[in-house]
Amino acid sequence: MSDNTEEKKPLDFIRQIVADDLKTGKHKQSVTRFPPEPNGFLHIGHAKSICLNFGIAEEFGGRCNLRFDDTNPSKEEEEYVDAIKRDVEWLGFKWAGDVHYASDYFHQLYDMALELIKKGKAYVCELDAEKMREYRGTLTTPGKNSPWRDRSVEENLELFARMKEGEFAEGSHVLRAKIDMASPNFNLRDPVIYRILNAVHHRTGSEWHIYPMYDYTHCLSDMLEGITHSLCTLEFQDHRPLYDWVLDTLETPCHPQQIEFARLNLSYFITSKRKLRRLVEEKHVSGWDDPRMLTVSGIRRRGYTPASLRNFCTTIGIGRSDSRIDLSVLEDELRNDLNVNAPRRICVLDPLKLIVDNFPEDKVDMVDGKNHPQNPEMGTRPLPFTKELYIEREDFMEEPPKKYFRLGPGREVRLKYGYLVQYVSHEKDSDGNITAVHCTFDPESRGGFAVDGHKVKGTIHWVSASEGKTVTVNLYERLFSVPDPETDSEVDFIDQLNPYSIKVVTNAVAEPELLNLEPDTTVQFERMGYFCIDLKDSAPGKPVFNRAVTLRDSWKSK
Ligand code: ATP
Ligand code: MG
């Protein structure tokens, strides 16, 4: 169904460009790429970029590369490379051929830098960082030419070779593109394209003493891979003239088109790797994959499905103006998916003992629970009904108001899939807390139907006290307590964390079948929300469940 509606949707502006380029024959096949820097885990914003780049490849019969932009040896780690590959695959995408690395091209990039020097378009500069800033000028005043700008080609070649050999200290020399110190665009005021770094690189070790800068590397990597459309976020718009300058100056055989789109900002969260890293390093969360983090791995651990994330990206679309999407849009996509696809199970989160006085002491009556109310093909599973049960504490009230269709003095209620029961009495401890409720059951009502056809309004869920299993359940709320934790520059975003973002319930009682739940399966705990097994904190026979999302958006009404 959703496929048809998607087809009718007009193409976003990027897909329109791709479609036009294929139609006019400008390109025979679209080639896109997703180019993460391996300096952190992927977040929900990256998912948008992944769905766009890989989505175009799928929809237009093109290819999409996965390329690690690993030009910054001091910040990158192998752990991130593995996590990023896993996340892309989990989202359901497959990159074309092998994984690429910008570091694969270090030799070619070096050769092209020599070419720029020979063309008189790059020079070795010895201004220190402070002087460099001073010479760069301001928004209103043009920059000044570096005193090293007019070195001869020979001298530049020799110095650049010596930079490569590690003869100079970090920061003493850089290679700069010779463009225009008076350009209104800062990116064109002789940008640095190589710097000296004596660091160990995760793939090339200590082979290199010089490393290419992002702007220089990115366009050339795109070109070397034959990328047709290089899609990036809006902050790169002012870099596009430099992207084009490098390719034009080197007269490369292929010239990818850079197109910018708006980044995803989500309410109640942040999508900056630097800030996410702080949350991890300062231990405000348990790690990059903390289920409260909207990282791809956190979301997965939380119980989100790949389909819900992909549908979310389709729903929000691709545009050119920055906006903030409400978190409820993401949560609703998850609910839409799980409402149709998640098997139903029963777990009592706040147990109150219910004793069925007239039920035989040792009898275990296996009743059938439907796995899905609308989809009989999902089958049933046996639920043990016994004399002592647990119900939710909130499903009993001593003095219930009229519209409370659950259990209370004088009330009759349906125990879902089980029997109709009638209130008898309840017990309290010395502090006045209700400790147990007594009832009687109607043996004729197995399955929950009244033989005489009388109406029973309330239906509540239950778990056998003797056959059920005590489990731990993590109830998550939003990580931040304000919709936009990043706007106010006066306030540290850490101070905006929601102190109640996790509530751990250690005495929940689950139906036995929940002990057999497959990893990576999210189920509905009837009436309580959607939950999955936490793969990190669970032990054999001792599952820990994470709440993926509540049944309805309860946040709005708070
Ligand atoms: P940082 O937060 O450290 O600046 P980054 O978000 O730019 O990093 P990269 O690894 O460079 O992270 O991003 C890889 C790709 O994902 C880039 O093409 C980038 O434009 C895109 N991307 C990153 N954040 C978002 C976002 N919030 N929405 C859409 N695309 C994004
Ligand atoms: Mg980046």
Image (spheres, helix red, strand yellow):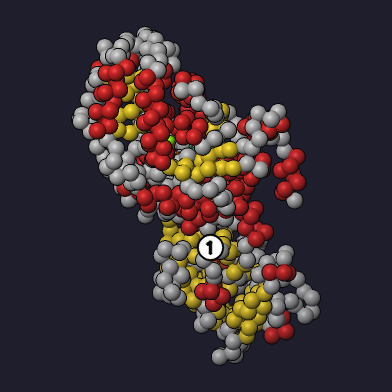
Q: Residue 484: x percent and y percent?
A: 46, 37
**Which residue appears at 67% of the width and 74% of the height?**
380
- Viewer-side residue, 428 vs 381: 381
Q: Is residue 296 left or right of residue 17?
A: left
Q: Residue 541: x percent and y percent?
A: 45, 76
Q: Is residue 62 above or below residue 521?
A: above
**Residue extending furthest right?**
453
Q: Which residue is mark 1?
A: 520
- Viewer-side residue, 111 vs 354: 111
Q: Is residue 413 visible?
A: no
Q: Quadrant of residue 372?
A: bottom right
Pointer 1: residues within 10 angstroms few (<14), some, or many (20+)? some
Q: Residue 473: x percent and y percent?
A: 47, 64
**Which residue appears at 33% of the width and 46% of the height?**
202
Q: Is residue 290 above or below residue 418?
A: above
Q: Is residue 441 visible?
A: yes
**Which residue appears at 53% of the width and 48% of the height?**
97
What element does badge 1 sit on?
Answer: loop
Q: Quadrant of residue 480?
A: top left
Amino acid type indicated by mark 1: Asp
- Viewer-side residue, 374 vs 522: 522
Q: Residue 356: x percent and y percent?
A: 59, 82
- The yes-or-no answer for disc 1 within 8 Å of ligand 1 is no
Q: Is residue 113 above or below residue 4?
A: above
Q: How many marks?
A: 1
Q: Is residue 174 left or right of residue 268?
A: left
**Residue extending furthest front?**
154
**Which residue appears at 56% of the width and 50% of the height?**
94
